[in-house]
Image (cartoon, rainbow, N blue to C red):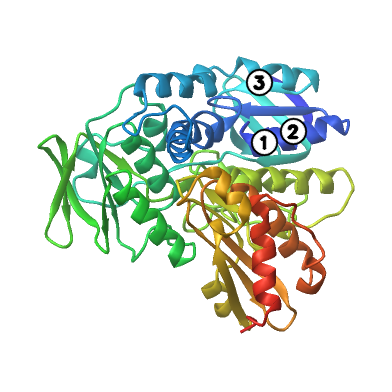
Amino acid sequence: MTKKTYDAVVLGAGPAGEVAAGRLADGGWKVAIVERDLIGGECSYYACMPSKALLRPAGVLAEAKRIPGVPVADDAALDPAAVLARRDVVIHDQDDSGQLPWLEERGIDLYRGAGHFVGAGRIAVGEDELSAARAVIVATGSGAAMPPIAGLDSVRTWNNRDATTAKKVPASMVVLGGGPVGSELSQAWASLGTKVTLVDPGDHLLGREEPFAGEEVAAALSGRFGVDVRLGTEVESVRAGGAGVVAELRDGGAVEGEELLVAVGRKPHTEDIGLEAIGVEADEHGFLTVDDRMRVGGRDDLFAIGDVNGRALFTHIGKYQAWIVAENLLGREVVALAEGIGSPRVTFTDPQVASAGKTLAEAEAAGIDAHAVEVPTDGAAGASFHGKGTGGRSRLVIDRATDTIVGATFTGFETADFLQAATVAIVAAVPLARLRHVIAPYPTRSEVWLKLLEKWEAGDRG
């Protein structure tokens, strides 16, 4: 076995691991990074990037049809083969060689394989043993969770990886789960011609968002994309048959599809990294518990960042946590605040759902004397340039005691770019009276902020 010593060893070369390794290397540390799959991680090849590549064409086509004078026929449809081909370009045909120069430029040593602890600060990767003199950072990410449904292990299923990298369009599909993954992929495949049935036990899709957001997405999926949305029920068992898989529902019905996509949540990759060798136990869900410096068990030599700690399962949060760790290890003390305040997040359906901070219900549950101010997202003059009927609602959740924003949700056509201003206002706790001086340029869609503040100013203060 070859042994080598580094200042830091990073387990996982997804976005969180890469940022941590890069910042430490830029700070003069000798760093190794270990990855069993592709450099760049889940988001680059199996999640965020390919799913958005599949979703974008339908949005472009819908916008073109709304604008008079654009030479697009009302019955124009997408070219599925071209969409899938472009998706493959976006994910570089799952070739990560383009990521290697970035590591090499920083002198980061890459070890390909499944790394696991063999002792404190010691990681085995194949025939190599890496010792971390100063810190080990666990950034192994997460994978699709499989629910305890009778028969599920006896049929072919898709997870997010299968659904974002499939090479052909299935004739039909059953999707379990109406969160961001289930909603986005239902729309993506329906836009390419798949007959989709979406099943979720909740009262509305996107259960962690404002109820109106999920209701708007469900209406668009069923009305524009032809998805059969089944709410308030769940799959009790599955079996092979019919077109491929038959799912028996709790309400007595049954649905079937050529493919069965399971999108009910994520589980962290901690089960085979040798935690027992260092006396660390994951929680009941497999996550590593960390403090606001991302330290595991308060230790200054062991950190966990990204999905693996369960604080907020978003790529951008993993990169943020990587910055937190690197800053502390480089002697600049900083603690994480973003997850507690409320992570920014976007569901890239059409309508998009962009939100940050707390929903109204979450704010009230936290004991905040909260109320909501709401206006139509397409109420600003700039919305007209994207065509009539884009719709959507924009809501600010306001703390009456401080007149600051604690939550924001924007639904409608391409609302993601509204979110950064909301995140700044929430994190900085900018008083609304001060925010009123932040001028939105005319004629842009960002004037939705002016509409919201005018409504608050006019007396809609709860």
Helix, strand or loop at label 1? It is helix
x and y, in percent, of residue 70 in the image: 48, 30
Asked if residue 11 can be seen in this view, the reply is yes
x and y, in percent, of residue 93 in the image: 49, 17
Asked if residue 291 can be seen in this view, the reply is no
Q: Which residue: 59% across, 27% down?
A: 35
* Marks 2 and 3 close (CB-CB < 8 Å): no
Q: Give left or right: position of 122 versus 245.
A: right
- The amino acid pointed to by label 3 is Gln
Q: Quadrant of residue 2?
A: top right
- The amino acid pointed to by label 2 is Ala
Residue denoted by label 3: 99
Question: How many numbered discs sit on the rendered protein?
Answer: 3
Note whether 119 is above or below 73 in the view shown.
Answer: below
Residue denoted by label 2: 21
* Marks 2 and 1 close (CB-CB < 8 Å): yes
Residue denoted by label 1: 17
Pointer 2 or 3: first along the chain: 2
Q: Give left or right: position of 205 versus 443.
A: left
x and y, in percent, of residue 348 in the image: 50, 45
